[in-house]
Image (tube, rainbow, N blue to C red):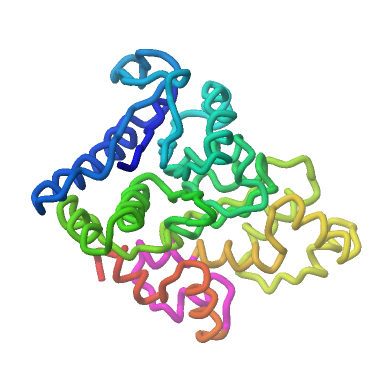
Amino acid sequence: MIIVYVLALRNSVPAAVADAGYVFSTVNEFLRQRGKDPLFSVHLVGQTREVSLNNGLFQLRPGMLLTEAGLPDLIIIPSMTGDMMTATFLNKEFAAWIAAQYKRGAAVASLCTGAFLLAHSGILKGRQCTTHWAYANEFRHHYPAVTLLDEKMITDQHGLYSSGGSNAYWNLLLHLVEKYTDRAMAIRTAKYFVIELGRDAQSHFIIFQGLKDHDDDLIRKAQEQIEQQHRDKLTVDQLAETCHLTRRIFERRFKKATRHSVFEYIQRVRVEAAKQKLELGRSSIQDIMYEVGYSDIQTFREVFRDITGMTPLDYRHKYNKEI
């Protein structure tokens, strides 16, 4: 029997808590239909016997307190809402417990913003994870020792699992089902919940918002200049000169403040502008290419695909209902 602990966090997303338990319970039912014994023993674990969520709209009633919990095979950290540092602080007692269970052999899976609590536990240091793309800048700011792959739908490394934004946790739950059972059961479960298997990237969902919550005013001004003049042929030397810095010092400070090189930042700003035009306008892809600062169609396509995981044409077909 595989023991699964779903954590009843303060500020957790009720649907994430419920869906995690529901998936494993459903797999148990599918196994019964095959004439097999249930595989998962799922428990809701909390610090108190009742946890109020969404200003009292939902109530969780854990069947097990943290002080009563033994060693699980798998810990599920659900998504959290609100300010992430506040949510993490409200659940800080879980962090040391999670780290201790992982060191004893338990696997740990964070759903969406649950990655903040997982990182707070310390066991992600020097390792990879993903989270909701909208919280990527904040995550990188608070946990620079963790390699954040915010373009990924899920990560799987050394018994640590994580999922990207919001409903991406379904892909992680299916991934775990396949890990603990087999591919056939994962497919059966995916069909039951009408979830598409094989999604491995959330790149095209990301809305690029350059990290500006830093103390370097000169670099913030450079970011604003890039965003306002991305159509122009801006060079690193021009930006450095505007900031009255040598190129080397400018590049170093820019990367430290924004977590991107200057070149990467310019490309992401241009691609974000192109995405908006592809979503809402009827201009040709070549015209859009010129409007956002590119002059070579092949380069534009390659950069666009590298950042979004899709070609400009595929992106337009996906999001522009007028085409």
Quadrant location of the N terminus in the rendered image? top left
Q: Quarter of the image holding residue 217? A: top right
Residue 279 forms part of the magenta stretch: yes
Magenta stretch contains residue 276: yes
Relative to 1, residue 205 above or below: below
Residue 109: tell me if it is visible.
yes
Q: Quadrant of residue 235?
A: bottom right
User: What x and y, as percent, mark residue 194?
Assistant: 18, 54
Q: Which residue is drawn at 48% across and 80% down?
A: 301
Residue 238 picture location, percent across and down: 80, 67
Residue placed most toward the observer, 193 or 295: 193
The magenta-colored residue range is: 274-295
Comparing 142 with 255, the one in front is 142
Residue at (46, 78) in percent of width and height: 287
Q: Is residue 288 left or right of residue 254?
A: left
Secondary structure mostly seen in magenta is: helix
Q: Relative to the observer, which residue lies in front, 57 or 182?
A: 182
In the image, 165 versus 279, the foreground residue is 165
x and y percentages locating residue 237 in the rendered image: 82, 69
Side (left or right) of 93 relative to 248: left
Question: Does 231 sit above or below residue 80?
Answer: below
Residue at x 36%, y 16% (from the top left corner) = 52
Residue 11 in view in this figure: no
Left of 178 or right of it: where is 241?
Answer: right
Please, is residue 289 above or below residue 21 in the view? below
Residue 259 percent location from the top left of the image: 69, 55
Q: Quadrant of the C terminus?
A: bottom left
Left or right: residue 235 compared with residue 60: right
